[in-house]
């Protein structure tokens, strides 16, 4: 879907070493940042299936920052990935030439038997992945699956028969602006670092590594820096409300790089994590519905999502939708903005057949659209 209100963002994976002294291209390294992404406001979220051992709870008893740390830090992982990126990759996060290096990031345990969530961009292109959980020993992790469209990945470690302590996934739809937030991760390799803040905004939308958008992103002013990627954003109950992934990086230093924390960070919501982890755990891949359009808010007196472009050969085009059409309902759900439609599409699965109500030239009509499977890379329309 098209972005509307744009901020510059950078990934939070720290990287060092590699060809010609470079790190993993288009991620943050100790000297700065080499990528930008867009941020907009977004509305409805993705489906919320739940991973096996990740439970949804709520509590009225607020823990102190120290109590949150004591309760959760032992389940936060320090991730080290040896990266090799091939030249000519179609991935916009990959370098323009062959490079290699060591990327470091964060993650957290989501099942007793060793499942760990992190960001896709932390482990993308990895030839080997090492994980250190809490103050435990470093061990090899297996990549179970990854999803570029949500920038999430699922790892697994051998627990040796010992049950790990999974962090609980909260219901991110209940998060409110002003709620306290706690981030635990490994900024600049400083393992299990705690930073604190609040939820500073909701319903943000950031761009994923494949160019599509991630909806319902949580904005926080808790300090996030290179190495925080994949770590948990926690509430006062010590539950995960999001996965820390990007920071706003609009200002650049004289050498063209960007620094660390700016007070604006972004976390992928826990409800999205639940859905993605379940799919990765049971098949290694994630299905995303695809309409094949780019969007903007309708102008004038009509509320809705205007189709800015329609991808040739996509589901929208096959159903007869055209650029300029204004979508006012999708699957029976009223649509008042581009964000509404983006979220509504995210709430469906590939193959779903949906009635779409549009306004065109003063007339209202309903068309039947069969949603497709999102392609690996965003093209002219998403």
Image: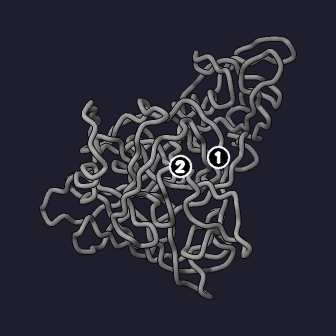
Q: Quadrant of the C terminus?
A: top right
Location of residue 227 in the rendering, given as x and y in whole percent from the top left corner: 46, 66
Label 1: element kind: strand
Mark 2 surroundings within 10 Å by alpha-carbon count, few (fewer than 14), some (14 through 19), many (20 or more):
many
Q: Which residue is mark 1?
A: 39
- Taking the image as shown, residue 60 lies to the left or right of residue 1, namely left
**Earlier residue among tags 2 and 1:** 1
Outermost residue on the top side: it is: 363
Residue 163 percent coordinates (x, y): 15, 56
Residue 56 seen in the current view = yes
At 69% from the left and 57% from the top, the residue drawn is 250
Question: Could you give the CA–CA distance between mark 2 and mark 1, rounded to whole angstroms?
Answer: 9 Å
Question: What residue occupies the far left of the structure in this picture?
Answer: 161
Quadrant (top left/top right/bottom left/bottom right) for the N terminus: top right
Total numbered labels placed on residues in the image:
2
Q: Under tag 2, what secondary structure? A: strand
Say whether residue 215 is left or right of residue 63.
right
Task: Residue 154: tell me if it is visible.
Answer: no
Residue 266, label in figure: 2
Image x and y of residue 215, in percent: 56, 39
Residue 40 placement (x, y as % from top left): 65, 41
Q: Relative to 60, is 258 on the left or the right?
A: right
Along the line of sight, the residue nearer the viewer: 326 or 290: 326
User: Which of the two residues, 291 or 28, is positioned nearer the viewer here?
Assistant: 28
Q: Are marks 2 and 1 in contact (CB under 8 Å)?
A: yes
């Amino acid at each position: 879907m098209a972005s509307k209100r744009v901020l510059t963002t950078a990934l939070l994976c720290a990287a060092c070493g590699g060809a010609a002294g470079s790190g993993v291209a288009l991620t943050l390294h100790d000297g700065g940042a080499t990528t930008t992404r867009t941020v907009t406001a977004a509305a409805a979220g993705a489906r919320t299936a739940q991973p096996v051992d990740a439970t949804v709870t709520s509590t009225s008893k607020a823990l102190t920052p120290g109590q949150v740390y004591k309760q959760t830090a032992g389940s936060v992982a320090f991730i080290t990935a040896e990266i090799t990126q091939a030249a000519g990759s179609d991935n916009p996060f990959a370098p323009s030439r062959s490079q290699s290096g060591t990327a470091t990031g964060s993650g957290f345990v989501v099942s007793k038997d060793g499942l760990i969530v992190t960001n896709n961009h932390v482990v993308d292109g990895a030839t080997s992945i090492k994980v250190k959980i809490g103050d435990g020993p470093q061990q090899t992790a297996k990549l179970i699956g990854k999803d570029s469209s949500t920038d999430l990945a699922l790892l697994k470690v051998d627990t040796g028969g010992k049950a790990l302590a999974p962090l609980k996934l909260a219901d991110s739809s209940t998060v409110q602006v002003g709620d306290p937030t706690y981030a635990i991760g490994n900024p600049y390799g400083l393992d299990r670092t705690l930073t604190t803040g609040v939820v500073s905004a909701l319903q943000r939308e950031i761009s994923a590594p494949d160019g599509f958008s991630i909806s319902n992103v949580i904005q926080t002013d808790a300090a996030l820096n290179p190495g925080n990627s994949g770590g948990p954003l926690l509430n006062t109950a010590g539950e995960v409300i999001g996965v820390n992934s990007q920071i706003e990086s609009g200002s650049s230093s004289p050498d063209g790089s960007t620094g660390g924390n700016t007070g604006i960070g972004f976390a992928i919501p826990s409800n999205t994590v639940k859905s993605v982890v379940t799919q990765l755990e049971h098949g290694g891949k994630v299905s995303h519905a695809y309409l094949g359009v780019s969007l903007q808010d309708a102008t004038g007196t009509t509320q809705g999502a205007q189709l800015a472009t329609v991808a040739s050969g996509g589901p929208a085009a096959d159903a007869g939708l055209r650029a300029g059409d204004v979508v006012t309902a999708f699957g029976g759900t009223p649509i008042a903005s581009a964000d509404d439609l983006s979220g509504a599409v995210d709430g469906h699965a590939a193959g779903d057949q949906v009635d779409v109500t549009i306004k065109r030239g003063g007339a209202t009509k309903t068309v039947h659209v069969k949603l497709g499977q999102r392609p690996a890379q965003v093209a002219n329309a998403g």
